[in-house]
Amino acid sequence: MHHEMNTDLYDSLKGLRENIPRLADLLGLGMDEEIGFWNEVVDAKLLSRFAPDFPVVAAICGGGSSGKSTLFNSLAGVHVTPTGGRAGLNRRALFSIPVQRAKHNDLLTELARSFNEVPRLLKEKEELTRPGKPLYCTHQSALENVVIVDTPDFDTGAKGAYTNRQVTRMVLEASDILIYIFTNSNYNNRDNTDFIAQMLTGIGKRKCFLVYRVYPSFTEEEVWEHAMTVAAGIYGDLADRYLLGVYRADEDNRVASGERFMEIKPASSEEPDFLQALQSIDAGRIRLSLFSSTLKDVCQQAEQVLNQSQVARDELRLYHEALQIAQDQFVREALKNFPINRIMRRFAQIWAETDPTHVKLMRKTGSVIEFPLKMLLGAAVWAKDQMSPEKDDAVPKDDYAQKVDEDLVTAVTGLHRQTVSSELVVDCSAQDRLARRMSDRVDRIRAGKNKGEKENPLITRSGDGSTLTFRVEAHAVVHSEQARLMSTDFKTVLQTILAGKDKILGISREMEADLNQLAHDFRSRMDLRRKISQTFWAALNVVPATVAVTYVLTTGDPVGGAGIKVKLAGLFGAKDLYALFAIPFTSGLKKADRQQVEDMLRVLLQTWLKDKSKIVQKLFQKNITGGTIRCARRTSAEADHLINHTDELLLTCTAGTKYNDIDTTVKCPQGAQQD
Ligand SMILES: Nc1nc2c(ncn2[C@@H]2O[C@H](COP(=O)(O)OP(=O)(O)O)[C@@H](O)[C@H]2O)c(=O)[nH]1
Ligand SMILES: [Mg+2]
């Protein structure tokens, strides 16, 4: 069960380690230093150790000449490290790795991360007596999943003290558990235990096995008593929580002479065999509690990055939306003076072509046909004049091409400026759905940002609350796209767009199909509503409905027009459209008929606007905003995905921090524990 938990935690942490820097990079959070530091902690302190198959690392420590090196050799099953002689003989850390694992270079690197060195293979014993990089050797003993580390003496004289202190700290840092060996002459030496206690305070308490190198004559009680003195010296009141087991190694001259290895026996008979106990250490569990505070810190920092990513993602969306609003506004600007007369003329043609035979016949007999067409064209021009803000009566009918040029230049210049600007400023109607969504987004961004940060006036409301002004800083994510656009010659951009003008002026195939559909729809509706249709035809003296289009342009009533106004307002701006229907009602068309021609006009205008807006928008996107919009869209989609995934991973990792395992591992035999 613990194994599963550890695998989950490991996988989640690994995912987190990938996602956090990616998010920061993707959204340009600009916290490279913090992220770099976070990466290092996760790599060095957590990931390396949370790998489910990482061996247990046991550091042998204790006072000088306690028998550390002798114990090391005994566990490894070979005489690799020098023993005896002066205290402080060993100056380096020596790792003994199960021979099966020795080929994994990664393991070596991970083992000695605290040293910032990769251990080198020990060639001759004498190397150990000179200070330097950590070394390693291999063992073939039963300890297939245990790495043993021999520590230099730490209680040596002034000269070597400092170096060995450092090495000792690094060894302890690299370890999961300790094997502390002591003798009858140093079990109550407070200096030794204080030193270890201090080290563990700095790097996190490790659990420990105690090995007493003792005279065979010592009783179980004496062994326990002295062991408890050592344990209390290292762990104070918490001794029984951190003690993994107490063992004895009886003095034997054959060990000293190298004839045989130390024999390590349980201090009391109920305890398991030492090698067995060492092998069955649940390293995952131990590491989880050992590093739970580091894991907690790492999770907290990850959460902060995640929050900042959410804010940055929202800011990016806001920028994206503001740019789209700006673009829509410039599209309308560009269409301000487009000649809708062409479309009207074409519709009139289609209508006439699809007239029933008897109507066609009637048309052939009278000049009435020509009249509405002419009238239609005139009315359309008039309507266009009404639609441009500054009424320019001087514009001749056929001078629209030039007007279109001017409007396009104005729109292109404006949109280009906004797209490369360091701050996007857009006004929109407070009623607009997108504007309302943006307004909510601004609230969310503010809530997500730290209070201390200076308030950025992202949004301003007009005095009467009818308009909202958004000021959105160009997001870091789109800076490169902005630079790209700026490096493109503006004149080229402009010319490319102007070259597409014919496409704007013409009637696209799509639009042609729409107009045909429109004519068909109206005709079939007229058939269905026979009565109205009869009145309609009667009123217009069997004039084709093209006249009706003209009719509404010249006689349209503002009340009937209200419906159209509302529907088109979003596309075209209410004021311009209003002009269409502000024409005095002069003829006696019945209300129902009027409604019908108004309906037709509405759809006609909508079709026209939809078609033209799409064309202009495409032109603008292709030449100005496309790169930025795509970049913003792609990045926020990717950020969404990453944020959701990271959130899940963080949940699993945070659950890991709640786990704590400092339970009683060893029970003292009755009466053996002393105060
Ligand atoms: N008589 C005896 N001497 C031992 C035994 N174990 C170790 N020694 C000796 O104690 C001395 C110190 O041992 P060593 O392993 O080098 O201790 P370290 O300084 O803690 O590494 C050496 O001379 C060893 O031969 C033992 O069981 N019996
Ligand atoms: Mg030694």
Image: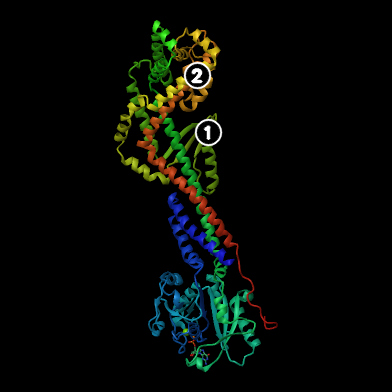
Residue corresponding to mark 2 = 524
**Residue closest to the far right:** 671
Give the image location of residue 179, x and y in percent: 54, 79
The kind of residue tagged 1 is Arg
Q: Nearer the viewer, residue 1 or 388?
A: 1
Give the image location of residue 38, x and y in percent: 47, 60
Residue corresponding to mark 1 = 433
Is residue 645 at least partly visible in the picture? yes
Q: Residue at x 53, y 53 (%)?
A: 647
Q: Residues within 10 Å of mark 2 (few under 14, many from 20)?
A: few
Q: Residues within 10 Å of mark 1 (few under 14, many from 20)?
A: few
Q: Residue at x 50, y 93 (%)?
A: 254
Q: Does 413 sit above or below residue 107? A: above
Indicate the secondary structure of the residue bearing disc 2.
helix
Name the image colouring. Answer: rainbow
Indicate the secondary structure of the residue bearing disc 1.
helix
Q: Nearer the viewer, residue 296 or 100?
A: 100
Total numbered badges shown on the rendered structure? 2
Is residue 576 at least partly visible in the picture? no
Q: Does 560 sit above or below residue 294? A: above
**Residue closest to the far top:** 366
Residue 375 is labelled as none
Q: Residue at x 40, y 9 (%)?
A: 369
**Image quadrant in which the N terminus is located:** bottom right
Give the image location of residue 388, x and y in percent: 41, 21
